[in-house]
Amino acid sequence: MPQLTLVPSHERAPEASQAPALDLAVTRFAGMASGSYYWPEGLLAEQLISGLASRSDRKQQALSEGQRLLSSYRRPYGGSERAAVLVDDRSGDVLAAALVHRSCGKNSSSTGCLDDQHAVLSVFLRPGFDRAKAQPLVAWSRQVPESLQGGEGVGEKIATTEYVVMDAASTTARPIVRPNKAFPAQVPLYPKALIYGTAQDALSDAKARRVLRLQTVDTPEQVLAFYKQLSPPLKDMESDLDGRNGFIAGSRNGLSFSVNTTVPRDMPAITNIEVEVSE
């Protein structure tokens, strides 16, 4: 089977060149959209990329009008969580995307996931892309993996199908609501980010009072540049960027804090951010 690839984008930022073209196309498409699909309130881009991650299960199908359907599974869930994208071969842009999921953690991290007989198909459309043209994604979702088929009346069924238009209201970052009121309000947070919920929840109560974990589809360079350009500037500022890891530290209004950025090896189009107030 040919390797799953995309036409490189001429608009790709040089600093993001290590990320696969597929990942970059997905982040351009999804922006800062978020939702509870594979896990509670995470970046849609990360969940789509995760659903395309299994190389051994990757498939591609040539369609009309110079389009391709690319699909795969999320490791290690045997196809119960899977994703597909419709790609314009000429530009490399994602026109529409889909997730088959179990609404894990929707509304509450304690809600859990739907069972295999009640899968949800979420279809995401580029603005102006007609819903009828996304039919190949609907047909793909009905190709149930063998491990989920079962006997008659048993096995995966798409119980709900939903459509979302990826307009500015969906893809623009929302103001960050600080989950811990004890975290100092005078510490600036990168505006194009969201709370990295699963990582934040792993913190102890004591540490959560002075640490916030965020995620963004922007590069570490963009995150560090935001803090370097604060006005008034940070006092005693120091910073560094080395490959996947970067940091900036300084003080503002008499409060010292640091910002660390990390690009995960398995998710190179996503930047994790940790803002920590000094003790």
Image (cartoon, rainbow, N blue to C red):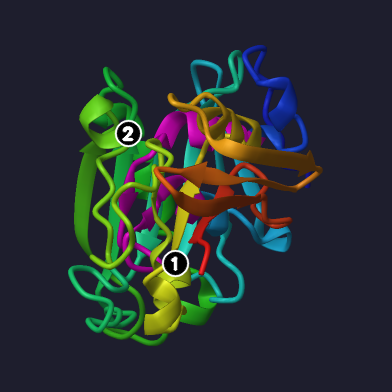
State how far apart marks 1 and 2 are (Cα). 30 Å
For label 1, the residue is 144
Reply above or below: 169 against 206: above
Q: Is residue 246 left or right of residue 168?
A: right
In this image, 36 relative to 212: left or right? left
State yes or no: residue 157 in magenta: no
Q: Residue at x 25, y 41 (%)?
A: 175
Magenta range is 22-47
- Tell me where residue 271 appears, x and y as whole percent: 58, 47
Say what secondary structure mark 2 lies in.
Answer: helix
SS for dot 1? loop
Residue 27 placement (x, y as % from top left): 51, 36
At a point 77% along the width and 36% down the height, the residue shown is: 18
Residue corresponding to mark 2:
171
Dot 2 crowding, Cα within 10 Å, few <14, some 14–19, many 20+: some
Work out which residue is located at the far right of the displayed protein and give it.
Answer: 242
Dot label at residue 4: none
Circle nearer the N terminus (1, 2): 1
